[in-house]
């Protein structure tokens, strides 16, 4: 049977596992919030964000004469351990909780305090030597430490997401070059339009996703404005003069991000606008990504009764009853991830709107929705690139035959025979099954030499003079 130690708080005594680095308030959160099953330990960048905040706070308190040197250096050592990925299993609090993040802030305070006590040769829970509240949380409250930690975590998570996005952009661009000579029909409203190359289509996929790299980075830059030192509601109570500016400076030095203290700390404490705009950038990315997956599924449809212009890598049997069927499972799963992102973005919107007066208590679900989206999108981007994009091949002859038999190429005749006659040719081709090419020759509208030049698909891929 596991041994326990007794700890106490406002509500009385509670048993905590003797070997746990967390304490009584974390244990209450474990007991109270069995909600999502996604724990703080599932998001290592968030824990690192907490560690950076606590290290910056300790450094600031030391520099302002509020913390002795020995205790400061030990706290800093423990924060470095968390930043390096140690003790993350000691963060068992559910990401969705009541209390405006107090449980997560106290989880960090308790883990750091008890690890410091261990380093000092003391027992866990001997908080008279290092207290979660009086030392680790010194000059702070949940209302400034928690949102600042979220922002530091999101800044690190954004770097990871953007790196994955850059890789899939490169993969699409490589396919664009590989398919640059594959002539095919472009389509609008699911109807034949005019010729293009498969390479142009894949290059467009790369270009549209590349736009979102700057959008994500620009929106993430809003996270560098923090409210450390504003404590409860932004007035700076319980923080010494100069703490806010110095803490932001120390946090910038530790993280490498250009962190600054918000110009209006009362405004900054309940404000969640930066989360809303960053979430919107992820939704924009998800909308584009889902559209691309729709296109890939259409282009690979068939293989005999669909477009079949490309082949997606076969990943698994597609049916328990239809032999030989292979489904586009990778684009399908990415579509579903994108739908999840849409829903989480709406959650962020509601959570941001629900802030009241000097605090937004809905930050736990808001931060969880954003972090889950980053995690899901990152995995989806890697999966789509590794298991789909890299292995796509083109059905060159299928693409070319569709161009040759398409009515859409009549568009190229507009500048030479006029819209009215082009329309008549298109209509007759549809009714008779004859080709546009043969009808124009039969009617003597153009010479064969000129017609061959105009209707050469390669001549229809870019602007040119008559």
Image: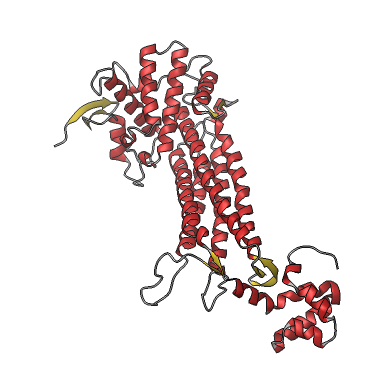
Image: 76 above or below 158: above
Q: Tell me if residue 309 comes above or below residue 34 in the rendering.
A: below
Q: Quadrant of the C terminus?
A: bottom right
Q: Is residue 264 left or right of residue 356?
A: right
Q: How is the image coloured?
A: secondary structure
Q: Position of residue 355 (x, y in %)?
A: 50, 38
Quarter of image, res 409: bottom right
Q: How many marks?
A: 0
Q: Is residue 179 above or below residue 107?
A: below
Q: Nearer the viewer, residue 168 or 151?
A: 168
Residue 238 visible? no
- Quarter of the image where one finds residue 114: top left
- Taking the spot 66% from the left edge, 61% from the top edge, the residue there is 200
> Which residue is situated farthest in the left direction here?
1
- Position in image of residue 52 (x %, y %): 44, 27
Q: Residue 360: x and y, percent?
A: 49, 36
Query: The N terminus is located in which quarter?
Result: top left
Image-based side of 378 in relation to 166, left or right: left
- Point out residue 281 in the picture as x, y percentages from the top left corner: 58, 46
Residue 318 appears in the figure: yes
């Amino acid at each position: 049977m596991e041994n326990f130690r007794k700890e106490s708080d406002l509500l009385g005594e509670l048993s905590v596992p003797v070997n746990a680095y967390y304490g009584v308030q974390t244990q209450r959160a474990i007991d109270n919030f069995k909600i999502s099953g996604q724990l703080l330990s599932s998001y290592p960048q968030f824990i690192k964000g907490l560690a950076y905040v606590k290290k910056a706070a300790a450094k600031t308190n030391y520099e302002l004469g509020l913390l002795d040197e020995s205790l400061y250096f030990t706290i800093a050592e423990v924060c470095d351990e968390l930043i390096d990925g140690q003790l993350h299993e000691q963060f068992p609090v559910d990401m969705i909780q009541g209390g405006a993040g107090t449980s997560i802030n106290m989880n960090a305070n308790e883990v750091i305090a008890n690890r410091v006590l261990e380093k000092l040769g003391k027992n866990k829970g001997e908080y008279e030597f290092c207290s979660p509240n009086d030392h680790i949380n010194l000059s702070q409250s949940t209302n400034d430490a928690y949102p600042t930690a979220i922002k530091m975590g999101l800044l690190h998570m954004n770097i990871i997401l953007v790196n994955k996005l850059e890789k899939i952009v490169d993969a699409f661009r490589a396919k664009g070059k590989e398919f640059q000579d594959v002539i095919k029909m472009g389509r609008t409203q699911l109807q034949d339009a005019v010729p293009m190359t498969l390479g142009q289509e894949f290059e467009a996929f790369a270009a549209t996703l590349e736009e979102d790299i700057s959008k994500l980075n620009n929106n993430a830059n809003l996270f560098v404005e923090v409210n450390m030192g504003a404590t409860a509601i932004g007035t700076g109570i319980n923080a010494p003069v100069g703490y806010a500016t110095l803490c932001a400076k120390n946090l910038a030095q530790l993280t490498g991000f250009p962190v600054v203290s918000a110009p209006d700390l009362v405004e900054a404490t309940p404000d969640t606008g930066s989360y809303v705009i960053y979430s919107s950038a992820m939704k924009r990315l998800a909308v584009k990504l889902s559209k691309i997956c729709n296109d890939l599924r259409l282009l690979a449809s068939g293989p005999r009764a669909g477009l079949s212009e490309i082949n997606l890598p076969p990943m698994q049997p597609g049916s328990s009853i239809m032999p030989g069927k292979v489904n586009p499972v990778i684009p399908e799963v990415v579509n579903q991830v994108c739908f999840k992102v849409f829903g989480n973005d709406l959650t962020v919107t509601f959570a941001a709107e629900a802030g009241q007066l000097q605090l937004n208590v809905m930050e736990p679900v808001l931060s969880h929705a954003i972090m889950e989206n980053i995690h899901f999108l990152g995995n989806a981007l890697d999966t789509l690139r590794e298991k789909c994009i890299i292995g796509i091949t083109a059905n060159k002859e299928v693409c070319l035959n569709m161009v040759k038999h398409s009515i859409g190429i009549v568009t190229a005749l507009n500048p030479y025979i006029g819209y009215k006659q082009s329309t008549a040719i298109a209509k007759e081709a549809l009714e008779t099954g004859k080709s546009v090419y043969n009808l124009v020759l039969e009617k003597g509208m153009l010479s064969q030499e000129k017609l061959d030049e105009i209707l050469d698909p390669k001549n229809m891929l870019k602007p040119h003079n008559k």
